[in-house]
């Protein structure tokens, strides 16, 4: 058996990297709707001026 740290160091020294691309987490799905931001024109200048809820 070979120690995991030894293998990790060897892989790092040789510059071996994975070929598969990572997940595209910031790409939006084209069928998901874009909702408008309704508070853009509201000045939120004091506490409890705007309330928020999420029903998921």
Image (spheres, rainbow, N blue to C red):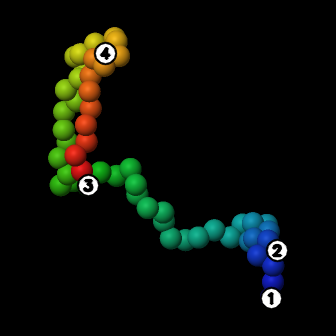
Write the residue at 25% across / 37% down.
53
Lower sequence index among marks 1 and 4:
1
Distance CA(mark 2)–CA(mark 4): 55 Å
Viewer-proximal residue among 15 and 39: 39
Reading the image, the residue beneath label 4 is 44
Lower sequence index among marks 3 and 4:
3
Residue 10 in view of the camera: no
Foreground disc of the pair 1, 4: 4
Reading the image, the residue beneath label 1 is 1
Reading the image, the residue beneath label 2 is 6
Foreground disc of the pair 1, 2: 1
Residue 6 picture location, percent across and down: 82, 74
Label of residue 28 in the image: none
Residue 47 picture location, percent across and down: 35, 16
Distance CA(mark 3)–CA(mark 4): 31 Å
Q: How many marks?
A: 4
Write the residue at 31% across / 19% down.
48
Lower sequence index among marks 3 and 1:
1
Write the residue at 25% across / 42% down.
54
Foreground disc of the pair 3, 1: 1
Distance CA(mark 2)–CA(mark 3): 41 Å
Rendered position, 7 above or below 31: below
Lower sequence index among marks 2 and 4:
2
Lower sequence index among marks 1 and 2:
1
Reading the image, the residue beneath label 3 is 29
Lower sequence index among marks 2 and 3:
2
Foreground disc of the pair 2, 4: 4
């Amino acid at each position: 058996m070979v120690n995991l740290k030894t293998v990790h160091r060897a892989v790092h020294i040789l510059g071996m990297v994975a070929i598969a691309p990572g997940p595209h987490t910031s790409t939006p799905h084209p069928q998901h709707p874009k909702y408008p931001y309704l508070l853009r024109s509201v000045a939120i200048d004091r506490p409890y001026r705007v309330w928020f809820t999420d029903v998921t």
